[in-house]
Amino acid sequence: MDFLRPQTWPEALARKAERPAAVPIAGGTDVMVEVNFDRRRPEALLDLTRIPELTGWERDERAIRIGANVTYTRVIEELGAELPGLAMASRTVGSPQIRNRGTIAGNLGAASPAGDAHPILLALGASVEAESVRGTRLIPAVEFYVGVKRHSLAPDELIRAVHVPLSPGPQQFSKIGTRNAMVIAVCSFALALDVPARRVGTGIGSAAPTPRRAVAAEDYVSGALPWESRDPIPDGVGARFGELVAQTASPIDDVRGSAAYRRHALAVLARRNLAWAWKEYQCA
Amino acid sequence: MRLKMTVNGESRDADGVWPGESLLYVLRERLGLPGSKNACEQGECGSCTVYLDGVAVCACLVAAGQAVDREVITVEGLADGDRLDPVQECFVQAGAVQCGFCTPGLIVATHDLIARNPSPSDEEIREALAGNLCRCTGYEKILDAVRAAARRKAAQT
């Protein structure tokens, strides 16, 4: 095994082009577990922690571009006001030590169906900035996840940043686990209200081979909410929304929970998240 | 590979490091610093918590090569010679140590917590220490120690 330590972004891209099997490592919170347990012996580790281009974030009118090395702790502390849903999800990751190292880009690179950042990235319509020596492209989150722990990056591509739209509206994220820290989600759900567009975005985690949107539930609830009057959610709408979310999932039975429990819990999470977000909208 | 890093204020070299090796392994097996404990090797237990450039991390999840030219502070680096750090003293006085295996990680995590937040609530203490496991059922004493350390820190500042 080799340990590659590029100092600049162009150098990192060149290394990845020469050695497509090199595994990128930033926080190490996933990669090092696999190496420590001998589950993976990559031919090389490509350390991205020395690359200044990846350590910052920047904002334009529509989105925040979060560099691949920005940790969960920094998302919580620096971006919590503008990206509340992503900050909520970040707070549920691991422990302080894990959040001090782990990154959104690393969550994407691991592409676990249970990754905590994925549901809100889907709900907000985020995109992944992937780059190689061949050029740069933006991959919508909805097209990024292609299978269990599989993503749509080409072998020579690296994640440079994540573009998260600034959504003018309330956001929520909830996750089921056996304790309040250090848990891999049994299932999770994120929701974002895009108030000007009168649209509700959703994301389901840990209840299908990939994170996924609940499109039918989005279409239904976006049309059923009293956006203009800001009245309470009509009777039955929350429950129907929850049902449609649960129907979109395709969970399995595993050590963390049964498929039936996941479906039930998702319906509850969806209904509650909608109620919390709507209450915030009514008070705004 | 050969690595150079600063550990507890001293420049240290390690030779013959395997590229997949963790910072924890280098500290314990190559630099003779066994204070950071090796238990879960997956970031679950917190017993290997160290500072890397001032940030509390699990040393088992840092590739050794990532620590090159960085500054590492381990539990061994907190005391001033024979004079324990106040956090260490509070753990001793509160009886927050049983088998002692989780203690180094808890000391570093507590040191980090009260440096950032000198008067944490109980909820904040629990949250800050959520990634440090004790299996001797010593959490109540540990909480006593953290509260005492925070009071001492607040009294100083």
Image (tube, coloured by chain):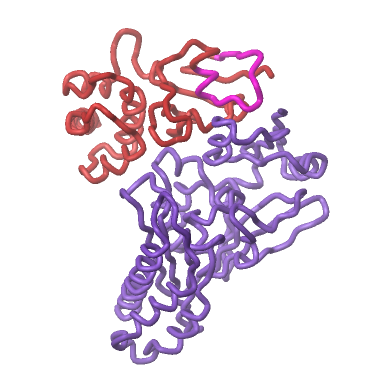
Chain colours: A purple, B red
Q: Compared with residue B109, is residue A65 higher up or lower down, i.e. above or below?
A: below
- Which quadrant of the figure has residue A273? bottom left
Residue B13 magenta-highlighted:
yes
Q: Position of residue A249 (x, y in %)?
A: 48, 69
Count of numbered badges drawn on the protein? 0
Side of B134 where A108 appears, left or right: right
Task: Kindly identify the residue that appears in the image at 23 percent across and 39 percent down.
Answer: B119
Q: Position of residue A162 (x, y in %)?
A: 60, 58
Q: Position of residue A223 (x, y in %)?
A: 45, 89
Is residue A29 or residue A145 the one in the foreground?
A145
Task: Kindly identify the residue that appears in the image at 72 percent across and 28 percent down.
Answer: A2
Residue sticking out furthest to the bottom: A229
Is residue A29 or residue A82 the one in the foreground?
A29
Q: Can you say which quadrant of the picture contains the C terminus of chain A?
A: bottom left
Which residues lie in the magenta part?
Answer: B11-27
Q: Can you say which quadrant of the picture contains the N terminus of chain A?
A: top right
Side of B33 where B18 appears, left or right: right
- Which quadrant of the figure has residue B121? top left
